[in-house]
């Protein structure tokens, strides 16, 4: 996928910015706070319907403006034109349109522009809490599978409704808990589908991560990515076994019955894929607990490179790569591996305070471009 032109209208400190982009590496440089990352956020909004920066999407709307708009013209690897636009307005749902139609939902555009993002916040994937790794898994699978994305959206709706009923019944002996049973059945049915799809993904993805890490670390370390679904019997997933949907449903039914009293007392759902973990191991130890700083960085780069390969192979479309201010975080060896990814056929968007990255690696090649960013104004220099 290639984004040929990009429009930012009242996004953060950009008034109206129109950018004609290179098919290769696009480097945006300038001082901090000038609007470099906002360009990448606009791409993320168009690909994933949300920014990759933590916080509300409405924070993208420029202060004092009523709405914000991002739009782009893109071409697939087969040179098919794809147009997409997302408008944000406080108090209203996102207005999404694309070549597929108008008044679309986020589910309709996610995956059309396969996207891989690497930023300093991504360090939580290897060092943070379980939800950080679940977010990675859900993001990658959702870009690869529309069915999974729909199941995930449906599951979140069911979980929200079930939790609301449990909260209403907390401490109320007269509450008719039969009201919860249909939501329990729905939670189990959709949750089982999610668990099986995650197990299949981690089995396949872990091998890509392992080989990528070995290439970066020159086979000096052993890593593994293991699935640890919440409260399921270990025999269902031991030795990378993929459980069936029927097996997961049966296990969840038993758990729902056994923990009914606990749920009544706590007023919240205590089982399900919203509590799953993906355990990352380095040399037999849990990465979050024992990996060195260098191992964390190598593992993160390996995961992102594997994510690129996985999405390209599944979607049969080259992902767009966003690299937000990462070169200050990487040593020369890891930076070289990221640069190798940028030198592939992928279109890349890079932010930096140092244009030397461009001059040292990409200057003189018409496939790449350098842009200065100052106060929301973007100027192409090469």
Image (tube, rainbow, N blue to C red):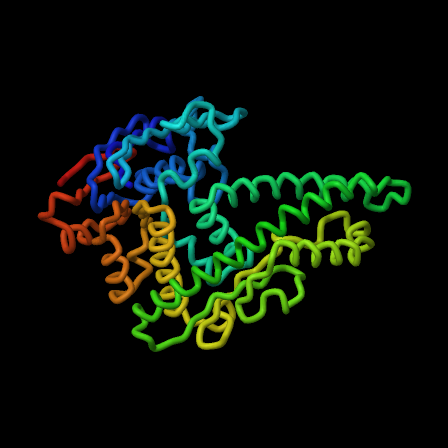
Depicted 243 relative to depicted 263: above or below: below
Q: Residue at x 50, y 38 (%)?
A: 56
Question: Where, by quadrant of the figure, is residue 163 drawn?
Answer: top right
Image quadrant assignment for residue 204 = bottom left
Residue lying furthest left: 364
- Relative placement, left or right, of 115 versus 74 is right
> Is 176 located above or below residue 290 in the figure?
above
Image x and y of residue 300, in percent: 39, 61
Residue 68 in view of the camera: no
Image coordinates of residue 336 in percent, x first then y, are 24, 62
Q: Is residue 194 above or below residue 382?
A: below
Residue found at x 43% / y 60%: 205
Residue 292 visible from this viewpoint: yes
Comparing 55 with 366, the one in front is 366
Location of the C terminus (image quadrant) = top left
x then y, percent, for residue 177: 83, 43
- Residue 24 left/right relative to 238: left
Count of numbered labels shown in the rendering: 0
Say whether residue 358 is left or right of residue 186: left
Q: Position of residue 370 (x, y in %)?
A: 18, 43
Relative placement, left or right, of 217 versus 51 is left
Position above or below: 364 against 238: above
Q: Quadrant of the N terminus?
A: top left
Residue beneath the point at 52% across and 24% down: 92
């Amino acid at each position: 996928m290639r984004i040929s032109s990009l429009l930012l209208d009242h996004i953060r400190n950009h008034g109206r910015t129109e950018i004609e982009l290179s098919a290769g590496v696009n480097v945006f440089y300038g001082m901090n706070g000038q609007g470099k990352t906002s360009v990448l956020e606009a791409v993320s909004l168009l690909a994933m319907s949300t920014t990759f920066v933590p916080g509300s999407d409405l924070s993208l709307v420029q202060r004092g403006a009523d709405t914000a708009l991002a739009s782009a013209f893109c071409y697939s690897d087969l040179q098919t034109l794809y147009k997409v636009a997302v408008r944000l307005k406080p108090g209203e749902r996102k207005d999404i349109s694309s070549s597929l139609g108008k008044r679309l939902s986020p589910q309709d555009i996610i995956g059309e522009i396969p996207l891989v993002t690497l930023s300093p916040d991504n360090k939580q994937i290897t060092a943070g809490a379980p939800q950080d790794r679940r977010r990675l898994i859900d993001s990658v699978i959702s870009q690869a599978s529309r069915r999974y994305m729909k199941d995930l959206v449906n599951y979140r709706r069911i979980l929200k409704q079930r939790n609301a009923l449990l909260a209403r019944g907390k401490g109320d002996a007269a509450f008719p808990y039969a009201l919860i049973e249909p939501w329990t059945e729905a939670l189990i049915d959709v949750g089982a589908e999610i668990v099986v799809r995650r197990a299949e993904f981690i089995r396949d993805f872990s091998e890509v991560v392992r080989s990528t890490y070995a290439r970066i670390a020159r086979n000096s370390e052993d890593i593994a990515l293991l699935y640890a679904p919440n409260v399921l019997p270990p025999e269902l997933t031991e030795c990378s076994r993929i459980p069936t949907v029927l097996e997961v449903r049966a296990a969840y039914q038993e758990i729902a019955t056994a923990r009914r009293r606990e749920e009544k007392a706590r007023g919240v759902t205590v089982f399900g894929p919203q509590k799953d973990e993906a355990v990352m191991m380095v040399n037999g130890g849990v990465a979050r607990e024992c990996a060195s700083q260098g191992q964390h960085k190598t593992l993160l780069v390996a995961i992102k490179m594997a994510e690129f390969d996985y999405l390209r192979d599944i979607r049969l479309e080259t992902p767009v790569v966003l690299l937000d201010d990462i070169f200050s975080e990487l040593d020369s060896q890891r930076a070289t591996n990221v640069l190798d990814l940028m030198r592939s056929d992928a279109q890349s968007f890079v932010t930096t305070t140092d244009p030397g990255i461009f001059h040292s690696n990409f200057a003189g090649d018409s496939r790449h471009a350098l842009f200065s960013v100052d106060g929301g104004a973007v100027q192409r220099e090469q």
